[in-house]
Amino acid sequence: RNLHMTEYSIFDLLLWANAVAAIWCVLTAKPCQFLLTSNLAIIARSFANISRFGQPFSQAHMPASLFADSNMQIAAHLITMATVIAAVLLVWPSRSRQVQVAKTMPPVPRVMLFFLVAYVVFLALTTRNIMTTPYASEDSYIVDHSFAGGIAALVFSVLLYEVQRRVILKQLTPLKGLGTYLLMLFLVLYSKGSTGLASGLFVVAAITVFRNEEKVAKRILMTFGSIGMIIILTSVTREIRSHVSSDGTAESLGSYVDSMKSVEGDIHKTSEGLEGRFNGSQYATHMLACIDIYEGGVSREWRSFLAPIENTFKPSFLLKPLGLERPIDATWELGAYYSHGGGIFVLGEFYWNGGYLCVLVGWLMIAGFCRFCDLRYRSSAPWLMMTANFGPGILMGVGYGFMQIGRHAINGLICLGIGRLWMAAFYRSNPRPHESSARESRDLRPL
């Protein structure tokens, strides 16, 4: 089915607008807004190809009715709303043009740091890598980690804070800090085939760490180079992780190169290009499915906003002992209507929850919080900790639903809650140097 709306649709304009915004975010060291606009650029490219060539080949199992012009028009409205909001928040001037960089930041206590590193080593040693075991296989785990829930994300976020802190305070060079962190990510996540959380963590690390490079040209080159490297690593890992253990490295890499050569050339046949390798076509289809359900008269009635909070007070390891039940996630509920392959694009989820108003409120919450993190992470230890927790979740969370984004934000609040007494004790024993303005005093205060 070929829609052929126009040779160049509104989605092409949205693609370029978000691509420019993403580049600007890298240049101005805004990691959270970079991940947000990058996601918008990916889904805009997917919709541009769908509007031009029709239903994506990878989504052939979904009903063709989802790709009707009426649903496509609503999708265009939603992405336009999100793009305008993100752009306004990106260019809106802050109250202080020059950020006061913090001169002191409390370190992670040595005892805690020891246990965090020990947990990373434990994860690395008790899981098999994709060279020996297919990704997501039951044999991947030597020791069952299901009891841990989202602890790994919390651990890597706290370690990211410590790396960022040391680089900001010039206790560690940006290159050494990022290299050490990438090594941990590779040993525990990338080598096991897991790319979503790892890529979000690394991108936030690269942008925030290299922001402290004094030479502007070097900073820009190293930041773009690091992001490009991680895109390639993620793309390769996602392509070979299911069969490299059986086919071998050489054959798997060969098939990857061959597929990459044809991916853009076959767009007129498949309706998807490089964006399809990063779930773009799947995200677009999720969005259309949510629109179709809501337009059919079924609403989630804003339930997605309460789910992350309720799940926080019902941790996975207490569900069975206490007989607790969590509310059904939007991703699973969508599966009751369509066999969609997992995930749910957050704009579609918001629309399913309450139409345009819900999209406006939900996206303003996410984009606004991204802006606060990006403006304050260099001047405030609490905001640096929040950025280390919340920022990485944006990359995968936008495509996997508000639950993912909310949990990463709550992780940041948990870290700040636990660290409140620790930060206060640190500042009592390490008085802050004289602050030149009330603005700096506010930024450097503990919670």
Image: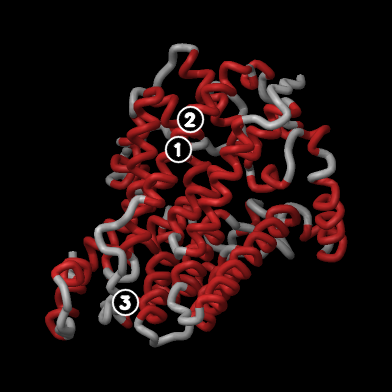
Q: Amino acid at mark 3?
A: Val
Q: Residues within 10 Å of mark 1 (few under 14, many from 20)?
A: many
Q: Secondary structure at mark 2?
A: helix
Q: Nearer the viewer, residue 91 or 52?
A: 91
Q: Amino acid at mark 2?
A: Leu
Judging by the rendered image, the residue that carries numbered circle 1 is 82
- Quadrant position of the N terminus in the picture: top right
What is the x, y in percent for residue 86?
Answer: 43, 44
- Residue 230 drawn above or below residue 429: above
Instruction: Give the CA distance from mark 1 to mark 3.
Output: 36 Å
> What residue do we see at 40% from left, 19% from top?
299
Judging by the rendered image, the residue that carries numbered circle 3 is 108
**Disc with the residue nearer the chain's start (3 vs 2):** 2
> What residue do we see at 33% from left, 42% from top?
365
Give the side of residue 259 with respect to residue 161, left or right. Answer: right
> What residue do we see at 69% from left, 22% from top?
5
Q: Amino acid at mark 1?
A: Ala
What is the x, y in percent for residue 244?
Answer: 78, 59
- The residue sitting at the bottom extreme is 171
Q: Which circle marks residue 189 in the picture?
A: none
Judging by the rendered image, the residue that carries numbered circle 2 is 78
**Picture quarter containing residue 391?**
bottom left
Instruction: Give the CA distance from mark 3 to mark 2.
Output: 41 Å
- Residue 413 drawn above or below residue 339: below
